[in-house]
Image (tube, coloured by chain):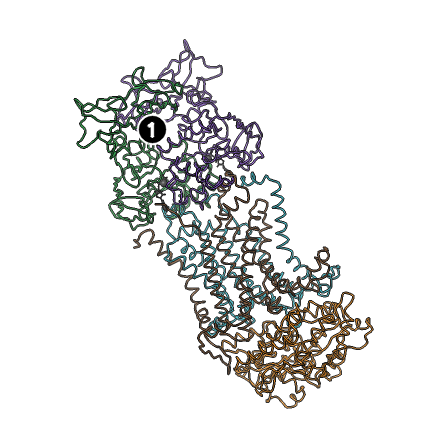
Chain colours: A brown, B cyan, C purple, D orange, E green
């Protein structure tokens, strides 16, 4: 008979609850993940109808240190990731707040929310490529007919401009889910706290700052962490829109890993880049989780 | 709700909200509107400056072309449906209990474990593509819809667990205790109390898992041949080396969004439903 | 100027009417309590005064000025919430200081005021805790402190003491009363505890299903309740109501209750009243005697200074309040008397008091 | 003894095999019946072909019998079967000898090109007439002058796609055409890079000059050739270096504003004459095939004169067989055939090696920098050669 | 068998000790109340009995069997929570029926039982509402109903009436008491309301900072409090404590308080006690007289049946409880007397009662 204490009983149930998920993850991902770590310490070649792998210790990683394109990709990636997380979370929060306002509760808005996210990334990238086209893109047409520009602009020609548009498109695509997540979080903020803050003289901004933000801490933490993971994995739009160009201005680490692995077939080196992405994501995520952790219950003696 | 109305007396703010909502709709919808417009136009009208919107250039041909000639689209939608439903359903069914356990059930080192779960998603897919292909092909499961679904499951599960865990952490302990005294075991509490009050995050997680599986491209590309092709692959087929059939591609994309939008319409109220008031009063 | 006035205020949630034509004036510096049973609309009324809910109809005035469209800050009111509504992520000190911070008070001053309020509420050792690590009563004290820490024109209290223990409750009552005497701030207080209402208020408004049944001083309400409802609501233990008949007598009237006849001197029933009436007898006016009306002991409830003895007799049940502890066993035979001078007579139909 | 052949290739409208693209369906069925073979097509959109193959090869398996290849033969050499020597002699003789250069590695021929696909110059006759320029430009000077003169009325004299540095059709490959026109080459006899020469610099300078003369400034942002093609087809550019394939879509009023207005000619000659690069659409056979014989038979069927003719007439992809190229019907429907044949008389090496992607990536990126004015032509070429040397050295 | 026994139970949250060596036996069928001020560990103790917290040390027995390791269901206890803990997604009816559903009772039976309980709690019109649309008191009644709906071995109540209005509270008290008499279910009840505790309990355990100060019948606790703490805690208004000195007298002892001398007949102070003592006087033992000790009126608080008059005299403040309403103005001069028979004497140091 199960005769254990309250907490122990819950712990045991907890292990049972976690088990299926753990098994699925282990069964599917354990080998590929371990293998990718191993690959990163190997030099891999396609020879004689097969593959040879040769341990080369940390040669791949050492080579990374001297690889200028890689260095550039790291810088780009960091900028992109910080920019994206900041933009997506703040726009997502703004959208969530709008949709949580009584005026924004119309179901139509929630449907609109899903729209940018529902489109397949491949199609999305091509769509934007056409929108941004310097010769027949609708964005140029629109801006010109509004008198905002005189000549059609080559949006993707200048490094920063191309970079900015990639960021914008990815933000556009990422906002819906984060907004949805934050909206679900907003629903949990007790109304009574707003009443109290209102009585305490807090304006809208202050209520937001002192009630909404702190009570949404966990939802925000999840949003930031997930968006960080995703922003470090951006791929499709670069592949379709710029191929990392012009002149490697928009090469992000994941795209570089792809290029090295699949175009150059330098699989070990590609795995090394991927593992750096992993390490970077891990560090960033841990940092964010730590930063966003709610304050420990403080008990004075 | 009535408090909100008392508070939103302030006209200026309402105007701000309305402007915000309009901007939001424009921001969300404008590119998609262009997608739909361009799917209804002949390419020659789109490549001129500015686009030629004269009536004669509008046509349903892209759609008929996509539906009739690319029969792959129908199969792609079906496959995507199977894959997405399968991976979403399983992700929720096994992810929600795991999230609950990691949030509430005193699992040892729950925080570290939760982070480890998430860490499986930190390695870019490109890095595991080749070993994963190897495993799946050894098992003879290349071009198998369910194998693809399982792979997506392994991608969605950690995210689902994370989303739900964050929300489960915020459930007031009191009602779990009440349920324990009322005779619900851990499972009963989870099923009857925790899940029903977590509909908004469950909705968010489900929509997430579904859309991700619906739209995933890279693994679909390498793990399928013809039979298990999903919608994104079909859409990608319109972009060739020398020529992109832009109109048809957009028509296919428009068709592929439809089921997701339909789901959003059906579940629009479930996606975000709040018990905030009742939750915190208690 | 901080008189509060409610004029013909109605409130409904959707189709459900919660407040009906409430008219109420709290004079400047007065301490008025809204007293009523659970769900009668007390919180709703308070919220409307605070500016947290809009009345469906009618006007709310503070200091003679219509404030329907003003925010709570503009109304300059402070409120203690029934469910505490503490900020879960802020420490006790931060909860207390929040409103001052919103007023851009300097940090040292905030700390000083917070410390003072915390001391008076015995919260000092808890200042650094989060609300989740406080017991229910401790949380409520923080909520009270949050209102005390600033000095508004109007204080609103929504059952602030309901979770405090007796001694602290009495202490807090005195504290609030004293504060009120010191600052002279107009106060609207909500409680369902009639004793609390009686001991703390200048005037009491008894609410019943969203209507004001009576508005008067504690003594008026206790001794001259306007309706049967008010009489039942006020007094602990509750007044006993016994059905009876009113007959015009020699001088005054005669009241017949289950075989007992009480002569009411100098009482002339108003025309159209009776003969069916209900007679209210407060427990302290029931005396246990050697001879008198015979009855049986049903239940004995000691409360310390007195013991409440439930008596069963012909006319129904009646509670007698006896000083000290009495040692009666359930079922024992006993006799009692009713003091006719203190009897309340209500019209059985309308419930209005006849005498 | 029925067997199933797996064929891996691109989807239409890119060069797809019979039965997949709409031509020669009946003949294909007949061939299958006659040979007791079933053919299972595994077709992927062109941009994904290489990834799909790379994944399969990198995990050690090549599940297909017949594979499409496009400049990747040296890269995937170890997975391919050198079958060309087993083809009928009359077939091999009927193909341009130089067409084998991109499918030959270490002296072995691994593939058969099935469509003659060389870059030629497409130009808008109407625009040239308006500018009083009768004939297409013949040399670099004329090319520059034409570009300049045609850049007017909101149009550009020239358009290209310089967005993607790597691969056939990428920035580097365009430069390789100019390089050969300037008399240069990529590699020395020993395989080491040998393009940091006057010719190499001149070729890049020519691209820079063209840019200044009137290349659509969007060219640097066009990552696919179709982005640039659309500009030509909308009539907003007058000249473009393009593949024969585009002839047919240009005649389709649904997608083109310049129906009947386009013409083609050989690429303008540089100091060393005209030259081009090869699109290299080839059929190859996987090493792991169970029935190499039948796989080769299938390729022979694809190259059958009748099929080749249908391919040309129905899909617009030129044949590779000289006899079919010279076929009057073909030349009548596809006036382009003659131009491309002419172009084929001149060099058209694509310089594919196992490192082609990596080298063209490195070189193309340097060229992009030069086109953007970040570097001079000489600096860019010098740097490109350094990078290329390092890549080759690493391969060992 | 459903006796509850706590043996040497300790509980701490991290480093903070909340319960210290609690020993308590609730006999089968007994109604015991845990009474204590806010934060003293009442809820924590109840949770340990319920099986919702594990004791840090010590054993908990129900029916003589150690239940430390049993789940709440296995212990067969029902509990009403202090913060209601209603299921926000279920209607009132579903909230009430949940525990029966968990027991796999048939639907019609559930409906029947729910309807009965709802009727007795006046919840019938609210059955289809969600908790968020209920007032605070209504929510609490639902929480009580949830425990009443089944018949467990042990009832646990955590301040179930704190949000109810007076009349309903009295009604609910009687209801719970009656239920207890009917079913004879062992009950552990938590409250901070001493009057509630007195009137409802067979025995009361007074908790102070996680320790049991006294465990006895209401009369014992009121009339013979073991410590100064208990004396102060019990009684409304609170007992007054006056510092004094104890002198051995002719027969018994003499108590000196601020110039007043009281002779305590037959009282021999234990060795080592005094001379410094504190003297507790309950308000009902202070009589206003024509002559006697002179004092001034400080505050007048009517509570209906009585009025509490705060007197200021040499020795400090003292409350007198006077029947009915008295009309005294603040500042008026007055005289009073203390009944020496009812005086309580505590050691000033230890706080233990000497007499
Ligand atoms: N948001 C709401 N929607 C619908 N009905 C509501 C809402 N808020 C309150 N009510 C109803 O209005 C009535 C009055 O509620 P209110 O909170 O004012 O009662 P109260 O007098 O404060 O009671 P309590 O003493 O129990 O707190 C109740 O019947 C309640 O159920
Ligand atoms: N989870 C916890 N972590 C730390 N301290 C806690 C926790 N729960 C309660 N406490 C502390 O333990 C003490 C006892 O709490 P408990 O809830 O048992 O008090 P209580 O007697 O029920 O008070 P009240 O009448 O106010 O409800 C309090 O000081 C409280 O602050
Ligand atoms: Mg209320
Ligand atoms: Mg408690």
Mark 1 Cα shell of 10 Å, populated few (<14), some (14-19), many (≥20):
many
Residue C219 pos. (x, y %): 42, 21
> Which of E164 and D238 lies nearest the eye of the viewer?
D238
The answer to whether residue D70 is above or below residue A220 is below
Residue on which the image places disc 1: E236
Q: Is residue B45 above or below residue D48?
A: above
Choose top left, top right, bottom left or bottom right for residue D355.
bottom right
Mark 1 within 8 Å of ligand 2, using the beta carbon: no
- In the rendering, at what x and y percent does residue E21 appear? 26, 44
Number of marks present in the image shown = 1
Q: Quadrant of the N terminus of chain A?
A: bottom left
Q: Position of residue C243 (x, y in %)?
A: 40, 21
Which chain does tag 1 point to?
Answer: E
Looking at this rendering, what residue extends furthest in the top direction?
Answer: C250
| Above or below: residue C240 compared with residue A61 | above
Q: Is residue D36 above or below residue C4?
A: below
* Residue at image coords 29%, 27%: E242
Near-viewer residue (E152 or D221) = D221
Identify the residue shown where x is 49% and y is 16%: C272
Image quadrant where one finds the C terminus of chain A: top left
| Depth check, front residue: B70 or A27 | A27
Q: Residue A25 occupies which quadrant of the picture? A: bottom left
**Helix, strand or loop at disc 1?**
loop
């Amino acid at each position: 008979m199960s005769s254990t204490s309250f907490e122990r009983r819950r712990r045991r149930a907890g292990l049972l609850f976690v088990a299926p998920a753990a098994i699925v993850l282990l069964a599917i991902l354990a080998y590929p993940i371990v293998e990718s770590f191993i690959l990163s310490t190997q030099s891999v070649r396609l020879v004689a109808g097969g593959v040879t792998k040769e341990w080369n210790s940390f040669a791949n990683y050492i080579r990374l240190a001297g690889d200028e394109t890689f260095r550039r990709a790291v810088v780009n990636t960091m900028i992109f990731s910080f920019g994206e997380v900041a933009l997506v979370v703040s726009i997502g929060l703004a959208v969530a707040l709008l949709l949580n306002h009584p005026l924004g509760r119309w179901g139509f808005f929630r449907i609109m929310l899903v729209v940018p996210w529902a489109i397949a990334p491949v199609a999305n990238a091509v769509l934007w490529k056409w929108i941004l086209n310097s010769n027949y893109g609708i964005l140029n047409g629109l801006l010109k007919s509004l008198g905002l520009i005189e000549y059609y602009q080559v949006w993707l020609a200048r490094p920063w401009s191309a970079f900015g548009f990639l960021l914008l498109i990815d933000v556009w695509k990422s906002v819906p889910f984060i907004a949805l997540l934050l909206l679900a979080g907003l629903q949990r903020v007790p109304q009574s706290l707003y009443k109290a803050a209102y009585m305490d003289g807090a304006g809208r901004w202050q209520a937001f700052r002192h009630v909404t933000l702190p009570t949404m801490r966990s939802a925000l933490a999840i949003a930031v962490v997930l968006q960080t993971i995703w922003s470090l994995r951006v791929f499709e739009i670069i592949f379709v829109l710029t191929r990392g160009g012009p002149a490697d201005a928009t090469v992000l680490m994941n795209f570089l890993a792809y290029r090295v692995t699949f175009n150059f077939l330098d699989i070990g080196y590609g795995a090394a880049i991927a593992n750096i992405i992993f390490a970077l994501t891990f560090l960033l995520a841990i940092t964010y989780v730590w930063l966003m952790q709610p304050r420990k219950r403080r008990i004075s003696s | 709700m009535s408090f909100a109305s008392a508070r939103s007396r302030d006209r200026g703010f309402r105007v701000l909200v309305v402007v915000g909502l309009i901007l939001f709709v424009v921001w969300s919808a404008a590119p998609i509107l262009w997608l739909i417009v361009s799917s209804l136009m002949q390419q020659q009208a789109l490549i001129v400056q500015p686009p030629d919107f004269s009536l004669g250039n509008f046509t349903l041909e892209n759609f008929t072309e996509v539906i009739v000639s690319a029969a792959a689209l129908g199969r792609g939608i079906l496959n995507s449906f199977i894959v997405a439903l399968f991976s979403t359903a399983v992700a929720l069914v096994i992810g929600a209990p795991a999230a609950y356990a990691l949030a509430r059930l005193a699992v040892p080192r729950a925080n570290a474990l939760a982070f480890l779960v998430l860490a499986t998603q930190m390695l870019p897919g490109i890095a595991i593509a080749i070993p994963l292909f190897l495993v799946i092909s050894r098992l003879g499961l290349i071009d198998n819809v369910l194998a693809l679904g399982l792979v997506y499951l392994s991608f969605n599960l950690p995210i689902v667990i994370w989303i739900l865990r964050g929300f489960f952490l915020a459930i007031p302990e009191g009602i779990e205790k009440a349920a324990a005294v009322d005779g619900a075991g851990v499972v009963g509490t989870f099923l009857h109390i925790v899940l029903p009050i977590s509909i908004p995050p469950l909705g968010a997680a489900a929509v997430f898992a579904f859309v991700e599986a619906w739209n995933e491209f890279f693994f679909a590309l390498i793990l399928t041949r013809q039979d298990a092709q999903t919608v994104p692959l079909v859409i990608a087929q319109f972009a060739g080396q020398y020529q992109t059939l832009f109109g048809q591609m957009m028509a296919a994309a428009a068709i592929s969004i439809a089921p997701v939008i339909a789901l959003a319409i059906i579940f629009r109220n479930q996606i975000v439903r709040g018990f905030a008031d009742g939750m915190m009063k208690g | 100027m901080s008189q509060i006035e409610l004029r013909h205020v109605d409130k409904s949630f959707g189709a459900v009417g919660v407040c009906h034509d409430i008219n109420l004036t709290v004079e400047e510096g007065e301490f008025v309590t809204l007293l009523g049973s659970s769900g009668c609309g007390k919180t709703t009324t308070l919220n409307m005064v605070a500016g947290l809910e809009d009345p469906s109809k009618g006007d709310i005035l503070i200091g003679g000025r219509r404030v329907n469209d003003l925010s709570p800050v503009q109304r300059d009111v402070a409120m203690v919430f029934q469910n505490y509504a503490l900020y879960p992520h802020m420490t006790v000190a931060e909860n207390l200081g929040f409103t001052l911070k919103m007023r851009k008070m300097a940090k040292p001053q905030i700390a000083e005021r917070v410390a003072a309020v915390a001391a008076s509420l015995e919260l000092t050792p808890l200042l650094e805790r989060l609300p989740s690590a406080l017991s229910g009563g401790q949380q409520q004290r923080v909520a009270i402190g949050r209102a005390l820490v600033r000095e508004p024109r109007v204080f609103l209290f929504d059952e602030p003491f309901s979770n405090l223990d007796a001694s602290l409750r009495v202490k807090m009552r005195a504290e609030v009363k004293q504060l009120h005497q010191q600052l002279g701030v107009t106060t609207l207080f909500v409680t369902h505890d009639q004793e609390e209402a009686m001991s703390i208020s200048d005037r009491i408004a008894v609410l019943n299903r969203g209507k004001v049944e009576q508005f008067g001083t504690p003594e008026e309400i206790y001794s001259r309740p306007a309706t049967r409802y008010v009489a039942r609501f006020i007094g602990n233990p509750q007044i006993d109501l016994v059905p009876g008949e009113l007959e015009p007598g020699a001088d005054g009237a005669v009241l017949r209750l289950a075989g007992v006849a009480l002569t009411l001197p100098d009482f002339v029933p108003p025309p159209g009243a009776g003969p069916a009436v209900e007679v209210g007898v407060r427990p302290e006016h029931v005396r246990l005697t050697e001879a008198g009306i015979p009855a049986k002991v049903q239940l004995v409830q000691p409360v310390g200074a007195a013991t409440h003895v439930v008596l069963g007799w012909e006319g129904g049940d009646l509670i007698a309040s006896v000083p000290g502890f009495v040692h009666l066993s359930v079922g024992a035979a006993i006799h009692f008397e009713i003091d006719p001078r203190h009897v309340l007579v209500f019209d059985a139909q309308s419930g209005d008091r006849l005498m | 003894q029925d067997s199933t052949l797996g064929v891996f290739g691109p989807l239409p409208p890119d060069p797809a095999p019979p039965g997949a693209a709409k031509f020669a369906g009946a003949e294909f069925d007949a061939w299958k019946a006659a040979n007791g073979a079933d053919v299972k097509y595994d077709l992927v959109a062109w941009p994904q072909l290489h990834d799909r193959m790379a994944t399969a090869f990198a995990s050690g398996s090549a599940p297909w019998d017949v594979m499409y290849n496009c400049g990747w033969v040296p890269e995937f050499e170890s997975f391919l079967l050198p079958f060309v020597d087993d083809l009928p002699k009359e077939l091999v003789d009927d193909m341009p000898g130089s067409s084998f250069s991109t499918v030959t590695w270490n002296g072995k021929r691994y593939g058969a090109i099935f469509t003659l696909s060389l870059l030629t110059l497409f130009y808008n006759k109407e625009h040239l007439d308006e500018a009083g320029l009768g004939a297409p430009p013949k040399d670099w000077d004329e090319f520059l002058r034409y570009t300049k003169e045609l850049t007017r009325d909101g149009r550009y004299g020239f358009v290209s796609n310089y967005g993607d540095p790597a691969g056939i059709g990428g920035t580097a490959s365009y430069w390789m055409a100019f390089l050969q026109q300037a008399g240069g080459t990529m590699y020395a006899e020993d395989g080491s890079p040998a393009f940091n020469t006057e010719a190499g610099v001149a070729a890049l300078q020519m691209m820079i000059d063209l840019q200044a003369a009137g290349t659509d400034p969007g060219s640097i942002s066009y990552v696919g050739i179709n982005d640039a093609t659309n500009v030509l087809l909308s009539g907003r550019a007058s000249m473009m270096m393009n593949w024969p394939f585009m002839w047919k879509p240009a005649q389709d009023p649904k997608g083109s504003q310049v129906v009947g207005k386009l013409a083609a000619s050989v690429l303008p000659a540089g100091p060393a004459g005209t030259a081009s690069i090869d699109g290299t659409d080839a059929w190859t056979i996987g090493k792991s095939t169970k029935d190499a014989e039948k796989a080769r038979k299938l390729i022979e069927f694809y190259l059958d004169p009748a099929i080749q003719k249908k391919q040309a007439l129905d899909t617009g992809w030129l044949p590779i067989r000289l006899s079919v190229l010279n076929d009057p019907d073909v030349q009548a429907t596809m006036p382009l055939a003659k131009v491309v044949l002419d172009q084929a008389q001149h060099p058209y090496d694509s310089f594919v090696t196992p490192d082609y992607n990596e080298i063209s990536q490195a070189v193309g990126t340097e060229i992009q920098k030069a086109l953007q004015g970040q570097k001079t032509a000489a600096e860019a070429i010098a740097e490109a050669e350094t990078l290329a040397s390092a890549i080759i050295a690493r391969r060992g």
